[in-house]
């Protein structure tokens, strides 16, 4: 029985790969819809890029909704320096033909959670948590109906990628992250601690290209492009596939390991704004609220990803 999910996203090359992996895995995942949020690039572009990815996968049946165009309180911070001006630099993909679905992404999230049986919809946020937080605030009745939240965001041992202490998704909208982490629902966190171990080395990029398909070549071109930031900053061996860790977890959770700990979000100090403070050693009496993932079987992850992308 495939798991019903809503992907909330700010494509972003790594978001694109996460979406492709989900769409290539219909036995495990049923994508109810995709909701775009402002993040890597402004909303107009993330809403466009999400449709470009659906068309690349041949899945124009997937509804794509535009959501919030800025964080709850703070002003938007984008990441063109990582993802390029379009947010999907690398491959030369055609503009989308499919229209946006009618209505706001926040209302789609609310309506879906009310329409589906309680405890059967998983939320998969891959960008700032603005849409999710707005849905929880607008319709508190839906919170307990969420099966699980599997998100890419945060960092602890790996520290920040946009500030010394904060990871981008959480830093952009810390107040939204605070609402989500305080929601009481089961949360699986894919922080930089694990995503920085999912690196697209040359052999792995070659394997994408060797698929010889439009999808395989586009993914190779996407990761070729967005590896620059991490290579320059960290000397990484390749692009970190942050967001695909979320979708891979849905398909093969045994690829990942972590610890159930308390995670709180810094929303007051400008110095550490957006830091995810993980009580990894249990030194506080704050109740554990998240499975904080720290490691993965990288070869197993890339084998799964490449095998699934071959299906599109
Ligand atoms: O910090 C990495 C995260 O920020 C990823 O989700 C990437 O797509 C960007 O949104
Ligand atoms: Ca993202």
Image: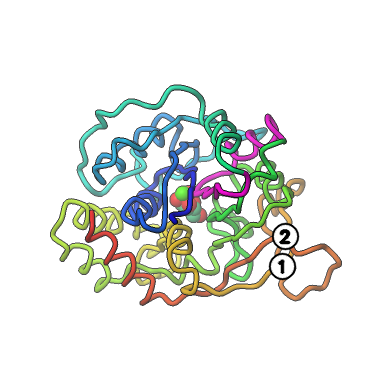
Near mark 2 (Cα within 10 A), the count class, few <14, some 14-19 or many ≥20, is many
Return the x and y of residue 87 as percentages of the image width and height: 36, 42
Left or right of 124 in this view: 61 = left
Q: Is residue 119 magenta?
A: yes
Calculate the distance from the C-alpha at mark 2 to the C-alpha at mark 1: 6 Å
Pick out the residue farthest to the top: 102
Q: Image quadrant of residue 128?
A: top right
Return the x and y of residue 42 as percentages of the image width and height: 45, 33
The residue carrying mark 1 is 261
Secondary structure of the residue carrying numbered label 2: loop
The residue carrying mark 2 is 289
> How many badges with numbers are in the image?
2
Residue 96 vs 271, above or below: the answer is above
Return the x and y of residue 25 as percentages of the image width and height: 34, 57
- The residue sitting at 71% across, 53% down in the picture is 265
Residue 241 vs 281, above or below: the answer is above
Q: Nearer the viewer, residue 244 or 102?
A: 102
Q: How is the image coloured?
A: rainbow
Q: Does ligand 1 reach within 8 Å of label 2's beta carbon?
A: no
Q: Find residue 190 and name its label.
A: none
Q: Nearer the viewer, residue 112 or 226?
A: 112
Q: Is residue 233 magenta?
A: no
Q: Nearer the viewer, residue 22 or 299?
A: 22
- The residue sitting at 63% across, 44% down in the picture is 118
Residue 267 vs 261, above or below: the answer is above
Secondary structure of the residue carrying numbered label 1: strand
Span of residues in magenta: 118-140
Return the x and y of residue 244 as percentages of the image width and height: 41, 58
- The residue sitting at 66% across, 47% down in the picture is 177
């Amino acid at each position: 029985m495939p798991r019903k999910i809503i992907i909330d996203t700010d494509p972003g090359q790594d978001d694109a790969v996460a979406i492709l992996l989900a769409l290539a895995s219909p036995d495990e995942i049923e994508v109810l819809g995709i909701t775009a949020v402002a993040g890597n690039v402004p909303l107009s572009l993330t809403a466009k890029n999400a449709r470009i990815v659906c068309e690349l996968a041949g899945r124009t049946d997937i509804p794509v909704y535009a959501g919030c165009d800025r964080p709850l309180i703070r002003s938007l911070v984008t990441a063109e320096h990582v993802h390029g001006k379009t947010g999907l630099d690398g491959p030369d993909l055609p503009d989308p033909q499919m229209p946006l679905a009618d209505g706001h992404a926040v209302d789609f999230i609310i309506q879906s959670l009310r329409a589906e049986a309680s405890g059967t919809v998983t939320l998969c946020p891959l960008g700032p948590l603005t849409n999710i937080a707005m849905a929880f605030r607008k319709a508190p009745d839906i919170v307990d109906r969420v099966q699980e939240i599997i998100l890419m965001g945060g960092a602890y041992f790996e520290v920040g990628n946009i500030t010394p202490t904060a990871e981008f998704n959480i830093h952009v909208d810390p107040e939204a992250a605070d609402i989500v982490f305080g929601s009481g629902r089961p949360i699986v966190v894919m922080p930089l601690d694990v995503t920085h171990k999912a690196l697209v080395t040359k052999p792995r990029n070659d394997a994408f290209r060797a698929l010889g398909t439009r999808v395989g070549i586009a993914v190779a071109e996407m990761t070729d492009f967005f590896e620059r930031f991490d290579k320059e900053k960290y000397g990484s061996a390749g692009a970190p596939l942050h967001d695909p860790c979320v979708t891979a977890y849905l398909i093969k959770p045994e690829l990942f390991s972590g610890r159930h700990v308390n995670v709180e979000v810094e929303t007051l100090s400008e110095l550490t704004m957006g830091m995810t403070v993980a009580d990894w050693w249990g030194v506080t009496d704050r109740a554990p609220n998240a499975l904080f993932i720290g490691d993965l079987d990288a070869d197993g992850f890339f084998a799964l990803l490449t095998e699934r992308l071959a299906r599109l």
